[in-house]
Image: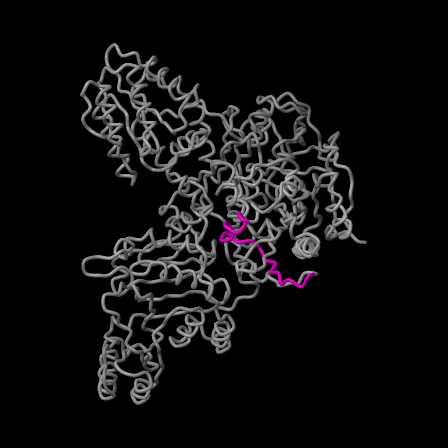
Amino acid sequence: MSVVNLEYLFSPRSVTVIGATNDPANPGNIVMKNLMAGGFAGPVMPVSGEAEAIAGVLTFSSVEALPKAPDMAVVASPLHEVPEVIASLKKKGTHAAVLVGPGFTGLDPDEVQDVRETILSVAEPPDLRILGPKCLGFMVPALNLNASLAHAKAKPGKVAFISQSDSLFATVLDWAKDKGIGFSHLVSLGQRVDVTFADIIDYLGSDPATRSIMIYMESLTDAREFMSAARAAARNKPVLVLRPGMALDSLVPGMGCRQVGGKRLCDEIYDVAFRRAGMLRVDSIDGLFDAAQTLSMPKPVRGERLAILTNGTSAGIMAADRLLAGGGTLADLSEETQAGLFDLTDGKITGNNPVDIPFNADGDMYSKALKLLTKDKGVDGILVMHVPWAQQPEVEIAEAVAKTLKRVKRMVLTAWLGSGGAEKARAVFAEAGIPSYESPAQAVRAFMYLAEYRRNQELLMETPDSLPSDFFPDTTTARSVVEQALGDDREELTEPEAKAVLAAYGIPVVETRLAVSAKQACIAADELGYPVALKVRSPQIDQPFDVGGVLLDLETPEQVWEGAATMLARVNRERPDAYIEGFIVQKMGRRMGAHELFVAAEVDPVFGPVIHFGHGGMAREMIKDDAIAMPPLSMSLAREMVERTRIFELLKGTPSQLPADVDDICLTIIQISQLLVDVPQIAGLDLNPLYADSEGVLALGGKIRVHPFDGHGQERLAIRPYPRELEECITTRSGRKVTIRPIRPEDEETHRMFLERLSDEDLRMRFFGVVRRDFDHKDLARFTQIDYDREMAFIAQAETDEGEVETLGVMRTNTKPDNSDAEFAIVIRSDQKGDGLGSLLFGRGIDYTRERGTLRISGQTMAENKAMQGLAKKFGFAISPAKDDPDLVDMDLELNKEPGTTE
């Protein structure tokens, strides 16, 4: 993952077109014409072996004949010629190429892999970046750069569009042209031999000309890089994604879909990933642009309660119906607001919401009604609608509404229905920066997108609850059990083994024994104590219930003996093909009134481990109540997962069932999440049923599948978990015991207290000036909720005399996606200086950055901060005046050599 040299792709000073011809159907000819018609300011140099001039521009016979190294090349050559062309371009000094040729069509998988490897070995990205092959190219309208096969030119704008589909690229271009919408970038990805979704999202995420990013996606191959880039971009600007769902997963081969509970899960896992990254998923091209328009407005939505103001009863009802059908909430207006509206309309309004003002309401009435709604604390957003009536001044009413909204901080959307005057009214709103739509459905959909985006952003920055301090999993035992099974060449743990692994992670389980005969079953039952359950054990029988292979509440050895014999006879009749290995004997774990749940896990080929939760027991397959989440999970994320199931409402309690301990359920999900992180040999897991009541949870059934895995367990996760292995305890000069560890989201409160205890001088030296002290949740979330793949914040913590934990200092590094450079910042509380803590914390951050292979680390400090400069010199940093600010100095240290260089 890297943005290195993408500036040569998207902001080139010169361009060459390889394979250009005068054949109007040839991609090389189309790109040449688009480049020239677009008005690109730099030189365009076609390379052709068959024409002296193309599109009025003289050609060159070869790459070597070009008068200068072009920044970017568009390659329209056949695929078998591409490696040689890339080699020539790299030798010439070109840093980016777009492959618009036919790509890998018609090649078998082995041939595709060979061609990929050949192209990459020649290009050596990021030295020469490659977009494509088999892509339509890209546009940067503000630079008049149209390096694409598109049939139309795009207007400049603030929206970027990345497409995995050529047809959607062309469709969106046409759609936007009709709507008068402009773009900062349009990019067709093609078959992604080098440049990926993650690379472009990273580039656009820091591009000031891009206000929002729209994506059309069908599949991913680099989930970890994508999630990291998307999470970073989504913190700064809206990232919207359109992905076709079940039809795509069913029809396109190689999507890696699985059937679980009668459902194909590809699309659901993508949905979870988008939500976890803070992105907003939409369901149509219209939805992409509606959401982009609405989210680009500076007034955020505060909640999900919508008030509807309209002069047409039916239009208001339609909007309300659409809102409620989509899971939205109609605002309940206060008595004060209702009284004000009653007086305003001379008693003609007697309802609550929608607010139906008279059909002939003028601009003044709209304005006054709108003011009343904006003052109501129970209203999060407002939809103002107008239905055309004879002699109604639609534009004047729109102008009155726009004028009123200049002084309003609440999110307000508008929908002026009809054409003619309504179109002019919508133009008034567009000029004022107010979202405007053509229909009630469109406006409500936009509001629902706003509400969902807000939820996703809150989820992205939510402060998780702390885990219980006594949760210390016995990872050694769990790994030992799994390794023993793998050593025996088994793919599934026995039920007692599975229960031992679960118990090692603190999950309450029912005691279980294996028996190969009825006699051994009786002995096991005596050891466990009665009553017991008896189950048949066979590798061919997944559900013993289905073949009469389960007996419950056996209370004597005689019942166990007779039950075993009866069960064997019944199972042999039902499944004569099944090999019976023996029996499973369990202590009866029935808990009257408990809810039956399930927790399961599988490994998705793209996103890695995935956890399932829902309604369990024998009805699981029929009810199909299944929520999905990706580890690592916090208590907040686990609760959000539980709340997405239908059984969540039942867990609150019913007339026939007491409430369950939801916190304990969430803890169980987190324990499973941590197990999947710590023991990567676990390929699948199924706890069913998992009993839950007010006393906690109890796992009756437990299956665990295993598979050999080489490498670190974190490698298979789409989101890097908390790096517990980086925790260490040190002793300062004074003898104080201090823990240095990576920061966690749960540290928000202690970090707030740390910032409060920094002196004014500490803050000035850290932030190079006077800063406000009222850090809000959003600020603190950014400080504590970091992406460990590209950021690190080591905090130093120690106990106070009262036994409380306090933060003493923090060392931060922020690493570029290509791992070439890292920036650092460090601050120690003034009352902790002089104890050697700064050196210890600074050294830990430098060592970590060196160990991860980063080439260089740098930072800035104020020229007057001699203490920081002295500390940096101690660690070998070079100190030099900052080029752009005489009050600052640069501190630079080389950590590792560039690949291929020597001492």
As drawn, the residue found furthest toward the top would be: 391
Image: 244 above or below 288: below
Side (left or right) of 793 relative to 718: right
Looking at the image, which residue is at 68% across and 24% down? 58
Quarter residue 767 falls in: top right
Q: Is residue 158 visible?
A: yes
Quarter residue 429 falls in: top left
Side (left or right) of 304 relative to 791: left
In the image shown, does 471 or 622 lie closer to the viewer? 471
Quarter containing the C terminus: bottom right
Image: 611 above or below 410: below
In the image shown, does 263 or 388 lie closer to the viewer? 388
Q: How many marks?
A: 0
Across and down, in percent, residue 688 comes to: 32, 66
Across and down, in percent, residue 852 comes to: 65, 55
Q: Is residue 119 visible?
A: no
Across and down, in percent, residue 589 comes to: 29, 73
Image: 79 above or below 53: below
Side (left or right) of 722 relative to 90: left
Q: Which residues are magenta?
A: 734-753
Looking at the image, which residue is at 24% across and 77% down? 551
As drawn, the residue found furthest toward the right would be: 903
Q: How is the image coloured?
A: one colour
Confirm whether the magenta stretch covers residue 256: no
In the image shown, does 157 or 541 lie closer to the viewer? 157
Looking at the image, which residue is at 51% across and 23% down? 155
Image: 357 above or below 876: above
